[in-house]
Amino acid sequence: MSPIVEAHDNLKNLGDAEGYPLSDDEIAFRRLLLGYCNEYLAFDYGFQICKYYELATGSTRAESVAPSRQYYQATCQFLKYKNVSPHAMHLIYKSLFHA
């Protein structure tokens, strides 16, 4: 079941002040969320849990782990169109934190 069933972009809301254009990064992030919001949420939630655990255990690598935009795009597309097992997700997260 998808936790997010509907999304609205309120950038063009009449109540918002004009003159605050979005940066290219913000536009790209909105496009990613409009296409893969559930996959992004699932991956990032798991990533944050793993990062918290690794930091709590004293991992120095966890401090600098930050997946790129392309990594998030590829992972979200992978999660949306493939059947991904919990074991596969474990390997994905493990590959990020263990060198």
Image (cartoon, rainbow, N blue to C red):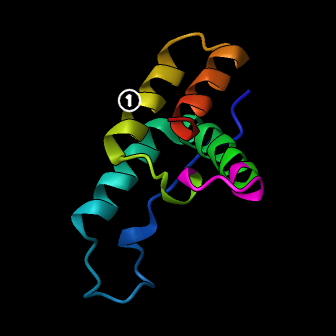
User: What residue is rendered at 48% in x and 15% in y?
Assistant: 81
Give yes or no for residue 84 being in the magenta stretch: no
Horizontal placement of 66 versus 63: left or right? left
In the picture as drawn, the residue positioned furthest to the top comes out as: 83
Question: What is the x, y in percent for residue 22?
Answer: 28, 71
80 shown above or below 47: above
Horizontal placement of 77 versus 51: left or right? left
Question: What is the x, y in percent for residue 38?
Answer: 59, 37
Classify the position of the N terminus by image quarter.
top right
83 shown above or below 50: above
- Front residue of 67/98: it is 98
User: What residue is rendered at 61% in x and 44% in y?
Assistant: 41
- Tell me the SS state at disc 1: helix
> Which residue is label 1 attached to?
74
Q: Please give the count of numbered marks on the rendered protein.
A: 1
Q: Quadrant of residue 50?
A: top right
- Front residue of 99/32: it is 99
25 shown above or below 16: above
User: What residue is rendered at 38% in x and 70% in y?
Assistant: 11
Label 1 is placed on what type of residue?
A: Ala
Question: What is the x, y in percent for residue 8?
Answer: 50, 56
Horizontal placement of 12 versus 89: left or right? left
Q: Quadrant of residue 6?
A: top right
| Crowd rating for badge 1 (residues with CA inside 10 Å; few <14, some 14–19, many 20+) | few
User: What residue is rendered at 72% in x and 18% in y?
Assistant: 86
Question: What is the x, y in percent for residue 2?
Answer: 69, 32
Horizontal placement of 84 versus 25: left or right? right
- Front residue of 31/94: it is 94
6 shown above or below 93: below
Magenta segment boundaries in residue numbering: 54-61
